[in-house]
Amino acid sequence: MARAFLDDNFLLHSKTAEHLYHEVAAVQPIIDYHTHLPPQEVAENQRWENITALWLSEDHYKWRAMRANGIPETHITGNASPRDKFQAWSQTIPNTIGNPLFHWTHLELRRCFGIDTLLNPDTAEEVWNAANERIAEKDFCAHGLLERFKVDTVGTTDDPSDSLAHHEACAALDLETKIYPTFRPDKAFMIDRPHILNPFCDRLGEAADIEINSVDELLKALKKRHDDFHAVGCRLSDHGMKHCPSAPCSEKDAAAIFHNARSDLDVNVSDVDQFTAYIMQHLARWNSERGWTMQLHLAPVRNPNSRYFSQVGPDSGFDTIGDWPQGEALLRFLDLLDGVKALPKTILYNLNPRDNALFAAACGSFQEGPTPAKIQWGSAWWYNDTLRGMTDQIQTLASIGLLPRFVGMLTDSRSFLSYPRHEYFRRLLCNLIATDVENGEIPDDRDLLDSLIRGICYENAKAYFTFPHHDC
C-alpha cells in the first residue's frame, strides 16, 4: 500500500530515522547564514497583498520551470495579473515531479498556509482563496514567519555600498531572530564592465566618505565598510566567481588596471583575474583578522541568454552551471593566504557537481586547529539543492572529511516561505544516517547519533560563525 504524500514520516524510512528527525532535528532552531532576504522587509515587518506577490515575484527557480512549461513571459516577469500568474504556476507544478519544486511547493503550502490540497489548474482557485485569507491574518508577516520556523539567525547578502540603516533598525526590534549583513563586494572586481564598476565606486565612496580615484582609495573605502559591517554584527563575506583568482598582481599593476577601468579604457581577461586576486587577498586578510568566514560560490554562468538579458535583466532565472576547471586555481588561492597565515574560516560551494570530491578533498589540505573544520565544503548549492544533490554532498563529505563537523543547511533564498527547505534537508539527513545504522555501518548509539544530528542542524553553525548574540 502506497504511503500518503507528505505524511508525518515523509522521507523517513525507519524507526531510527523517525526518532532522529522528530525528536532531535525538528526541534532545533535554524541558523540561515546565507540568504538573499531583504533586510528592509524585516525592519518594516513586511506584509503581502496576495500569494503571487509573496511566492512568485522573486523566485527564479519557479520562473525557470514556468518557461520550460511553455508559459509566456507576460505571466512570469511581465504584466499579467497576479491571479493569472498564479494560474500559470498551477499549470506548471504538476510537471515538476522529480524536481524539488514539487516538494517545496507543497511543503510551503502545508507549513506556511495550512493547505493540504495539491496544486494544479483545477485547484488553483481554491488554493488562491485559502492562501490569501491566511495572508490577511495578523500574524502572517515577516516577523511571524521567522518566529513560526524558529529562525535564530539570518545572514542577508549586502553590497558594501548599501546603507546599513535597515540592519540597525532590525537590531533595535524586539525580535528573537537576529538579522546580520554579509559583505559581498563582487562589483569591485568588475573592471571589464565600467558601467557597473564606476557607479559602484561612486556609491561606495559616498558610503565610506572617501573619494575613489585610485586602487588605494578603493581599498580604504572597502576597509571602512568592512569595519562598519562588523559593527552591526556582520561575520561573513560572500564572493561569487567563475573560479578562484590566483594570478600574481603587484600593487603597481593593480593601480594601472584600476586607473584604466575608471577611465573607461579597455581591460582584458588576464587583467580581471589579476585585479580580483589583488583585492581578494586584502579582503581575506581582513576576514582573518576579524574572525569572519569567507564564502566562495564558484562556477555560475551569468546571463547566457543575451536576448532575454536585454529584455528582463539579470537574476531572472537564466543563469546556469559553468564548465571551468576549479582545482588548481582554488588550491593556489588558498595556499597564497595560508602561506602568510591569513586564511580565514572558509566555506567552498561548487555549482558543477562533477567537482564534489575535488572540493571536499581541497578542504582537507588546509585544515588547522583550533577551529574544527575551519575550511568547510558548503551545503549542496543551487542546481545541487535536490534530494540527489544533497545526498551526494553528504555522502561525499562523510567519505572524505568529517560529516559531524558540517555547518549544515542554508536557504540561499529571497523568500520568507523557504524555511521548509531546512525541514527537507533535515529529513533527508536523518534518513541517510539511519540507513547506515540499520545496515550496521554506524553504531546504534542514541547519544552519538543525537549529537551528530544536533550538530549539523544547529550547534556546529552556532559555534563556527560566532555571531554577536551567541557570545552573550
Image (cartoon, rainbow, N blue to C red):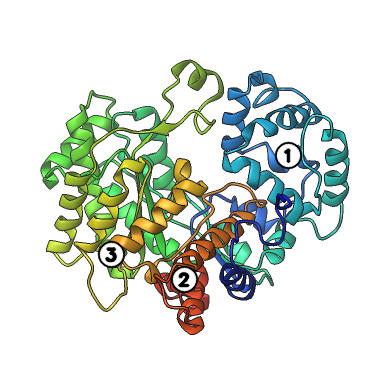
Q: Position of residue 261 (x, y in %)?
A: 26, 31
Mark drawn on residue 106:
none
Residue located 47% across and 69% down the image:
456
Residue located 51% across and 34% down the image:
315
Determine whether the residue tagged by mark 2 lies in a helix, strand or loop.
helix
Q: Position of residue 138 (x, y in %)?
A: 85, 58
Q: Amino acid at mark 3?
A: Pro
| Quarter of the figure with residue 124 | top right
Q: Residues within 10 Å of mark 3 (few under 14, many from 20)?
A: many
Residue located 34% across and 29% down the image:
194
Q: Is residue 336 above or below residue 310?
A: below
Q: Amino acid at mark 1?
A: Ala
Q: CA distance from mark 1 to mark 2?
A: 44 Å
Q: Is residue 465 above or below residue 89?
A: below
Residue 417 lies left or right of residue 115; in this view the side is left
Q: Residues within 10 Å of mark 1 (few under 14, many from 20)?
A: some
Residue that badge 2 annotates: 437
Would residue 32 be visible to someone looking at this image?
Answer: no
Say whether marks 1 and 2 touch (CB < 8 Å). no
Residue 415 lies left or right of residue 84; in this view the side is left
Residue that badge 3 annotates: 344
Say whether marks 1 and 3 touch (CB < 8 Å). no
Would residue 309 be visible to someone looking at this image?
Answer: yes
Residue that badge 1 annotates: 53
Q: Position of residue 104 (x, y in %)?
A: 64, 47
Which mark's residue is nearer the viewer, 1 or 2? 2
Sequence-first disc among 1 and 3? 1
Choose between 340 and 205: the one closer to the eye: 340
Q: CA distance from mark 2 to mark 3?
A: 35 Å
